[in-house]
Each structure stands twice: as C-alpha cells, then as structure tokens.
Image: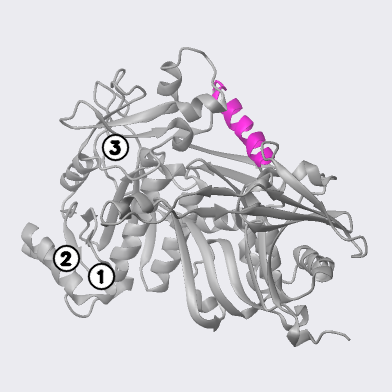
Amino acid sequence: MSTKKSEIRIQRLRVRLFKTSVKAFEETLKDSVELTKYDLLGNLGFDGTLFISKPTQGTPAWLQFMQSGTQNTIEVLSNQSNSAVLLVKIDENIYGIAFGHGRHLLKEELLVQDFGIKVSLNGIEPASMRSIDTFTIEEQTVHKRTQSSRASGIEIFGLDISRDIVRAITGIPKNYLRFESLAGSDATVAVSARMEFSSIEKVCKKLNRLYKGTSYQSNFAWVDHIKKVKESSKIKELDKKLIDDINDDNPTSYLAPPEPINWVDFNYFSFTQKGKNQIFDLNLASYRQNLKSKTVDTEKIKRDHAYLFSSGLNEAIISWSIYNCLTYEVIEGSSRFVFTKSTWFEIEKSFAEKINNQASKIEKIDLKFPQIEIDKEGKIEREDEYNIRAAKSQKGIALMDKKLAKCESTSTYIEICDLMSEDQMIIHVKKKKGGSSGLSHLFAQGRISGEALLNDKAFRKKAKLHLGSLSKDYAKRIPEDGFISNKYKIVYVILGVDPATVVEDLPFFSLLNLVGAKQFLTSIGYQVAIAGISVKES
C-alpha cells in the first residue's frame, strides 16, 4: 500500500554542491578525520556513501561555574557531538548533505561557493521573503540580518541595492518545487520537504536546476554587482598579484588605516611595536624601507603590523596587520577585483562602469582654499589645523569643526559640518590618507547632517546657535523654520589629492559611497560638489 504524501515526514536537508573537478567522494573529506563508512542500498537509483565520525563527549562549559555556586555535587553531565555527511553522485555532480556537525568534515575550498545564494534567489517567491542577511563595506564591514514578521517583498527590508551585498536569504519556495521551506547562504542550501530517502535524487536535481537558472535576474539582478571572493584558489591567485604589485618599483596598492582614526589624538605610526622609525603617514614606501629583505610574501604581510601611537603615550594603542591595511584594485578580463580590509571583492564590469560614470558627473569646484602642508619631519597637517587655516584664508568662512548637535534620527551627537561659507556651502573635510574607511565616514557625515538640517528643527536650532557664537551674521545662514535645501550646496573636500583627478583617484568603495551620498542628497533637494586640496611641497 502506497504512503500518502501527508503521512511522509518532513525532512530538512543541508545540501552543498562540489566543483565539477571533484570526481571521487574521498576527495571531499578532510584527511585528518577518522570516519566510518556505510554504503547505501543498491536499488536507490544513485550512488552514495555515508561517512560518520566518532562522537566526541565532554562536560558542558557551564558546569564548573554552576558547581561553584551549589551545595551538592551536580551529577555528571556530558554533551555528545555527532558529525555525519552523506555524499551522493547524481548526473556526475557530487553533493554533500551534512547532519549534526558534518559540514566540518568537508573541504570547504572544493565547494561551489555561490550554490546556496543562487538556489535560494531562484527558488524563493520574490514577494515572500522572510529574512535577508547582508553586509556593507563602510567604516567597518557591517553585517546585518533583517527579518519580517510575515513573508514580504524586497522593498520591506530596506536594502540599499547599490551597496548591500546579500549573504543569505530565507523565504517561501515557489509552489512548483513542492518544498516546505527554502534558505540559502553562501555554499549551503537548507531545504525542507516531505520525502523518503529515495527522493534525495529528485531534490538534488531540482536544486541543480535552480542553481543554473537565471530567473533571479528579473528581481535580484543587483546581487551580481559586488560579490565576495570565497574560493581559496582564486584568493591565492589574487594575493599573488597583490604581492607582485607591492614588490614592484611603482606599486599601485597603498596602505591606509582600516578604520577611522582620531587624528586629534594621533601622534605617529610605526612598523615596530616599540615605535622605532616614526612616520606620520601610513604608506607603502615607508613599510618597504623598514624591511630587511627587498621583497615580501603573503605570510609576511599577514604577520607584519602597523602600530598607531597616540599623543602622550609611549606604547601603541592599536595595531593592524599590513594585509588588513592594504587597498588594491586589479582588472582581469571583464571583471574588476578590489582588495580592502583583508577581503577580495569581484565587481561586475558594467556596474563598475556605471558607478565611474555617475561619479564623473559630480561637480568639481575650486574653493580657493590653501594647500595642505607637511612639516620638516614629514608630518602631514592635521585636519583640525587645516580647517582653522582654511577658515582664516577667506572672508565669511565659519569654522564649524567639532561643533556637534543632536538629531532625532541618530542616538549620538553628530558634527554639523567642518566649514560653512557665506554663499551657503556646507563643507565637510577629510584626508584621503584615511583610506576607504575615513572617506566613507566623510560621505556618511554629509548625508546624515544634510538630512538632519532638512527634517529636524532642533538640529537646525543648535546649528544656528553654533553659527551665532561665531558671528550674528553667520546665524542667519540657517533658519529655524523655512529651511529650503536647494539653496545649499554640500561640498566634500578631500585633502592630499590632485584637484583635477579627485574623483578618478578614489578607491572603488569610496566611489560607491560618494555616488550613494550624492543620489540621496540630490533627492532631498541639495546640490552636491567635491573638491580636492593638493599637498604643498616643502
């Protein structure tokens, strides 16, 4: 008697697909693990083998702590960890289905790294998503999980499709698949279905068709714009290009702090923990001069560090690996690869061209500000010092650096701007040497401040008070009521760059953030411009 579909239990599988270069089951398994092998029944219609590792046992991590606070001896407790993986070959493709901690038995570098995300994007109803995991390259790599209380379309999740990189997605599967649930993350598909063991073949074939499909491009084409490179062989290949560039006489890669720096408290950088050979600009030339050998390799730049020393302290307050400080871009065929914060990203060619084109249309202006200076020791002028000089260089420039105000949309006080001119230019200033992190902070600052000035009366009132403390005439520049954004121009000033190529010389992720800020600010009425300030040669 046949079993009714409703009587078949729901089984949840976590499925991974191996690269086509993998031909045998044993190739997929880590060599250091001792496994017991079980052959499958011969009448299933597909080949497969179950591998199970020896269970590991141990006391719970919390046992000692709890025992210290109880009178009687807690009876012996133990946790048992089980790991198993079912490997099946279907249409010459090898799939790994993990149970327990079974994924740790597999060689991750042999997996198809976008299998999970592609399957889920093609298999989930576009209007029926429940959860999306993304990360964004800004001052830090920001990871975010957004969940909806009910199945919803992409618009509910508040994604910025020009910057957010999708890592995982969960939702209701399309009806024809006959799945109960579907989720995908990187190389893994989690699928639930009413199924018997023999149905594994049918499920894997469905997943493979979804992986090869392109229907996702109708609703989610933007996910292909920026992809994190995950294949170890490709990372190794790209790392070699980075190393070759570093060792070249004229490298295009450069060093920059991977996070925002408080330049007011900054004293100097060093490539030694004891602070020898002090430098005031984190740069590749100084790093290479500090080397005993003329060349480096990947292991060395991961091992070597840059140290930041603050004013008044004789010890480093923070350090980063050289690998983490490097930024580099390389073009291979139709793809552009960007390295930043220890991670490689692949940028779709058409998307990169679109961003470059949009950035090139941003107005460049000459503010007639002085050049940024370098002292005899080679120390670049601090931003606050430069802002003071810039404000004094022209009549009517209000010095607003470090003038803070609270706005409704943030939990902290924010800087209104660095400078403000009498012709209604709201000016934000940042050194390029801060790298993508500092520049992302610059563009975000202009965006947040611009929105607050438009929508938050209390913020405008505080800005007006700050301006009034400098001059009664300055206070008239921002009204408490009747603020009209199209009368103002938000200007991003980048210190230490060629004014003629200020946009073209920006790292890709900085360009991306600049374009995003410009689009937002113009959508709420502002004019937007950018200016470069060159270095005064001593």
* Nearer-the-camera pick, 51 or 526: 51
Q: Are marks 3 and 1 in contact (CB under 8 Å)?
A: no
Categorize mark 3 by other alpha carbons within 10 Å: few (<14), some (14-19), many (20+).
some
Categorize mark 1 by other alpha carbons within 10 Å: few (<14), some (14-19), many (20+).
many
Q: Are marks 1 and 2 in contact (CB under 8 Å)?
A: yes
State the image coordinates of residue 231 (x, y, percent, origin top left): 66, 44
The quadrant in which residue 385 appears is top left
Count of numbered marks: 3
Q: Are marks 3 and 2 in contact (CB under 8 Å)?
A: no
Q: Which of the marked residues, 1 or 2, is nearer the chain's N terminus?
A: 1
* Nearer-the-camera pick, 447 or 420: 447
Q: Does the magenta stretch include residue 241?
A: yes
Tell me which amino acid carries mark 2.
Ala
Q: Name the residue under label 2.
A: 463
Tell me which amino acid carries mark 3.
Gln
The quadrant in which residue 524 appears is bottom left
Q: Which of marks 3 and 2 is in front?
A: 2
Q: Give the range drawn in magenta.
A: 232-249
- Residue that protrudes farthest toward the top in the picture: 292
Q: Mark 1 points at which residue?
A: 453
| SS label for mark 3 | loop
- The Cα atoms of the two marked residues, 3 and 2, are separated by 28 Å
* Nearer-the-camera pick, 221 or 67: 67
Q: In this view, does 290 lie above or below 76?
A: above
Q: Name the residue under label 3.
A: 371
**Observer able to see residue 482:** yes
Q: In this view, does 325 lie to the left or right of 36?
A: left
Q: Which of the marked residues, 3 or 1, is nearer the chain's N terminus?
A: 3
Q: Does the magenta stretch include residue 381?
A: no
Tell me which amino acid carries mark 1.
Leu
